[in-house]
Image: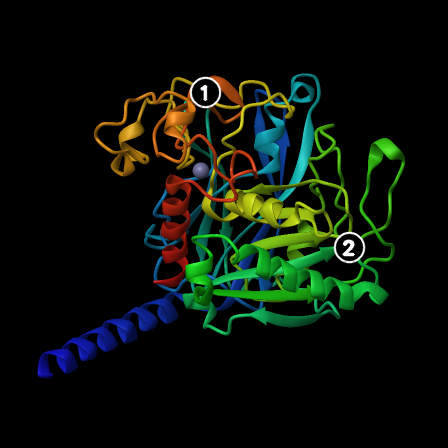
Amino acid sequence: MMKKILLSFFFFVVLISVRAEYDSLFSAGTLRMDYYHAGDAQNEYFFFKEFIHEPFWGGSHTQLIDAFEYGNHRVEMTDLATGNLLYSRGYSSLFAEWQTTAESKILQRSFEESVVMPFPKNPVKVRLLSRNRQGEFVLFLEVVARPDDYFIRPAAQLPCEVHQIHGNSDPAHAVDIVVVPDGFTRDEMGFFIEKAADFANHLFRYEPYRSHSDLFNIRVVAAPSAESGVSVPAKGIWPQTAVSSSFYTFDSERYCMTNAHHCLRDLAGLAPYDQIYVLTNTTKYGGGGIFNFYCLSSALNQSSPQIIVHEFGHGFAGLADEYYDSSTSYDSFYNLNIEPWEPNITTLVGFGDKWQSLLDPDTPVPTPDTPDWEGIIGVYEGGGYSAKGIYRPSRDCLMHTFKGEVFCKACQQAIVRMIHIYTD
Ligand SMILES: [Zn+2]
């Protein structure tokens, strides 16, 4: 008994000192940096726009340094005086995907992006890094942020109600999802909130989310659009909506995303968040999800439950697509000479760091892609938009098709590990 009391006292003291350490470095809220990510297939540039002080910080107070090295890019915040690393996070972008399209070979384009970090008490350096084709991080932008700088803009006080629809945990110990509507008018706000409740039910239908549902908070920002629906350029449909979502991203019909990223962040920042999910008012099949950037999908399609959980796999856990049909606009998305950073695909260059520990010692590598191996974790050729040279953990998975309605064990493991980053 005494041991138990001593042990809980020890954890209490650790908790207090961790809180004190966070409070000595950061004040309330988020430092958001807006910028433009521009270039073409060969070149990239980051152009600073502005810093914004948002009222909430949805992230952890203890796990401030990135544990995974996922993502094509990384944000780092260092103390200006000491150079100590205070915060880092990996993320990916629409720009990085666009760099693998044919258009990027003949055109320079720019994309809106933002990074968020806890609001510092002392002057800091914010650094943006991006991976080269060899997978190494290269520094692209370095900006000093002084917390008393009068150019740090306070977040806009947008007149949108925020509703908590799932969970009631401290944001510092929960995965906080903010759901933002697009293409729902003021009269359709009640309908949107019903669809957001469906979003929560769909997500928690699948493992490992089901058994971890108490570690999630889901909030919705009731932001109305002037007009109903979503843009479909090839059909001449262009409604005025809150975050300007559009099908035919990169001229791929089902790829629905937005380039109004700063506007999306303004709405998301009305609640504490770790992940942004945009639900669009359309029955048309489609969506997208980018790691630590945002996810977006149709609220009203019959496959919405599977699309939601698939896109959230990208946005939350950094999972790769395990499919390899010809339905995307990408040319050689992955460099086959290096190990991709995503936890659920491998080029076999560095497989030891992936799901090898989940394999039965008798399972051959590569594993035959035949019905005998159905449901068995292995190393199956084909994945990451390529039939050759990239391997996936299971014959089927929600990151591959929606037939089996389950995540493979490698994806489940990656999701659980990510949940603990936000909640431990
Ligand atoms: Zn999988």
Q: Do labels 2 and 1 touch, CB within 8 Å?
A: no
Q: Which residue is mark 1?
A: 335
- Identified at 20% across, 78% down, the residue is 8
Q: Is residue 9 left or right of residue 106?
A: left
In the image, residue 137 sits, relative to residue 289, either above or below, namely above
Tell how many labels.
2
Percent across and percent down for residue 298 are: 71, 48
Which residue type carries mark 1?
Answer: Asn
Query: Is residue 38 shown left or right of residue 20?
Result: right
Could you tell whether 243 is left or right of 63 in the image?
Answer: right
Image quadrant holding the N terminus, namely: bottom left
Crowding around mark 2 (Cα neighbors within 10 Å: few <14, some 14 to 19, many 20+) is many
Location of residue 21 by image quarter: bottom left
Q: Position of residue 294 (x, y in %)?
A: 59, 48
Please indicate, yes or no, whether residue 222 appears anywhere in the rendered image.
no
Q: Quadrant of the C terminus?
A: bottom left
Among the two numbered marks 2 and 1 on one chain, the one whose residue lies closer to the N terminus: 2
Q: Quadrant of ligand 1?
A: top left
**Which of the pair 199/177 is nearer the observer?**
199
Looking at the image, which residue is at 80% across and 58% down? 184
Residue denoted by label 2? 242
Outermost residue to the right? 236
Q: Describe the colour scheme in one phrase.
A: rainbow
Compared with 411, 173 (above or below) is below
Q: Residue at x 70, y 17 (%)?
A: 106
Q: Could you tell me how far apart the alpha carbons at marks 2 and 1 are, in whole angstroms?
A: 37 Å
Q: Is residue 279 visible in the rendered structure shown here?
A: yes
In the image, residue 194 sits, relative to residue 125, either above or below, namely below
CB at disc 1 and ligand 1 closer than 8 Å: no
- Going by the numbered disc 2, the residue's amino acid type is Ala
Q: Residues within 10 Å of mark 1 (few under 14, many from 20)?
A: some
Mark 2: C-beta under 8 Å from nearest atom of ligand 1 = no
